Image: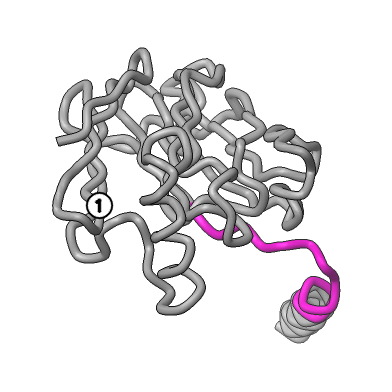
Amino acid sequence: MRQHSLVNICAMILLIMVAETSATTSVPATTQVYSTYGSELIVRIEPGSNITQDDDYGLPFSEQNAIAVYVRYDEGSKSYRFSHSVRLANGVAPLEAHLHETGILITVDNFGGGTANGPAVAIYSAAGQTVATYALSDIYPQDVVRELKRAEDNERRSWRHQKDRSFIARNRFVVPDVFGNAFYFNIYNGTYEYK
């Protein structure tokens, strides 16, 4: 009995030391986990540290960018196994991500650093290849981007509608915007309609 108490105390001390160490380091914590229906596939997004992504001459896939780690349930071992990882276009981490039942991952973000160059929407195939990435300057005219940039600076306004969330509907990813319209992205080829 006394031996178990000593082991428990040592384990508690170790946990406190790890927590204090991670709190004082600059390594960002994992912030988001997404799963498919039935949780056969889980994607964990680990934030990157590329906060100056837009000053990096538009190089979207820096070694410092966020990573999506895929794990898949293995029926034989009754546990999750590492499948693959994907370097995301997001410098730090997307504001939201959606995982389709086929393994397609879609990330949504505001434009980084107050510019329109960061990836607002990125679509990745189940194997982790980039299907499409769109900056706000790719999907909106420049006058709208300037308006959004001013609103972002002054009012913390986002291009995405805050109450009507983004969602996947069959083969489309729908992003309602602040202008009362929505983007409809084809999740397989990345093409989109705006209406």
Read off the magenta span.
19-32
**Residue 10 in the image: above or below residue 108:** below
Q: Could you classify mark 1 by the number of other residues whose Cα lies within 10 Å: few (under 14), some (14-19), or many (20 or more)? A: some
Q: Is residue 23 magenta?
A: yes
Residue 91 in the image, given as x and y percentages of width and height: 67, 48
Q: Secondary structure at mark 1?
A: loop
Q: Nearer the viewer, residue 107 or 153?
A: 153
Residue 29 in the image, given as x and y percentages of width and height: 66, 62
Q: Quadrant of residue 117?
A: top right
- Name the residue located 50 percent from the left edge and 39 percent from the top edge: 135
- Name the residue located 65 percent from the left edge and 53 percent from the top edge: 92
> Horizontal placement of 116 versus 92: left or right?
left
| Quadrant (top left/top right/bottom left/bottom right) for the C terminus | top left
**Residue 178 in the image: above or below residue 67:** below
Residue 172 in the image, given as x and y percentages of width and height: 22, 26
| Quadrant (top left/top right/bottom left/bottom right) for the N terminus | bottom right
**Residue 17 in the image: above or below residue 152:** below
Residue 74 in the image, given as x and y percentages of width and height: 47, 24
Q: Give the residue furthest to the front.
A: 143
Q: Is residue 174 magenta?
A: no
Q: Quadrant of residue 65?
A: top right
Q: Nearer the viewer, residue 194 or 51?
A: 194
In this orientation, does residue 165 appear?
yes
Q: Nearer the viewer, residue 24 or 59?
A: 59
> Horizontal placement of 69 versus 188: left or right?
right
According to the image, label 1 marks what residue?
177
Which three-letter amino acid code belongs to the residue tagged 1? Asp
- Name the residue located 66 percent from the left edge and 45 percent from the top edge: 66
In this orientation, does residue 3 appear?
no
